[in-house]
Amino acid sequence: MLLIFGFKSYASVLAMLRVPCPQGHELAAQRLTRVRRRFTLFWVPLVPAGTRYQLDCTWCGLQRRLDEREADELQRRG
Ligand SMILES: [Zn+2]
C-alpha cells in the first residue's frame, strides 16, 4: 500500500507594525506573520505540527523568528 504524506504550512499576517529594526535603520513597517504547520496524509491536513511567528522588515527584508509571547506583546502594543 502506498502512503503519501508530508507537511504543509499556512501563513497568516497578524499585523503590520512600525517598530525599530535591529539592522539599525529607523522605524520601518514590520509584518508579523504566524505560520502553522500541519501533517498531511494524501494531501489532507490532519494534525498540527507546530506554529512559529516571524517578523519581516519591509525596508531591508530582515526576517526574525519570535516566540508566542513576543508576538502577543507586539500585537498588544500595535
Ligand atoms: Zn530592517
Image (cartoon, rainbow, N blue to C red):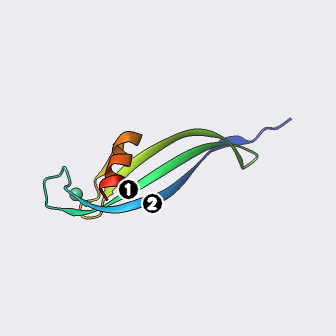
Q: Position of residue 29 (x, y in %)?
A: 27, 64
Q: Position of residue 25 (x, y in %)?
A: 13, 58
Q: Quadrant of ligand 1?
A: bottom left
Residue type at mark 2 is Val
Residue type at mark 1 is Leu
- Which residue is at 33% across, 56% downward? 56
Q: CA distance from mark 1 to mark 2?
A: 6 Å
Quadrant assignment for the C terminus: bottom left
Looking at the image, tell me whether mark 1 or mark 2 is earlier in sequence order.
2
19 up-or-down from 73: above or below: below
Crowdedness near tag 1: few (<14), some (14–19) or many (≥20) residues, C-alpha within 10 Å: many
- The image quadrant that residue 52 belongs to is top left
> Residue pushed farthest top?
1
- Which residue is at 54% across, 47% downward? 36
- Which residue is at 13% across, 53% downward? 24
Q: 78 or 18: nearer the eye?
A: 78
According to the image, label 2 marks what residue? 13
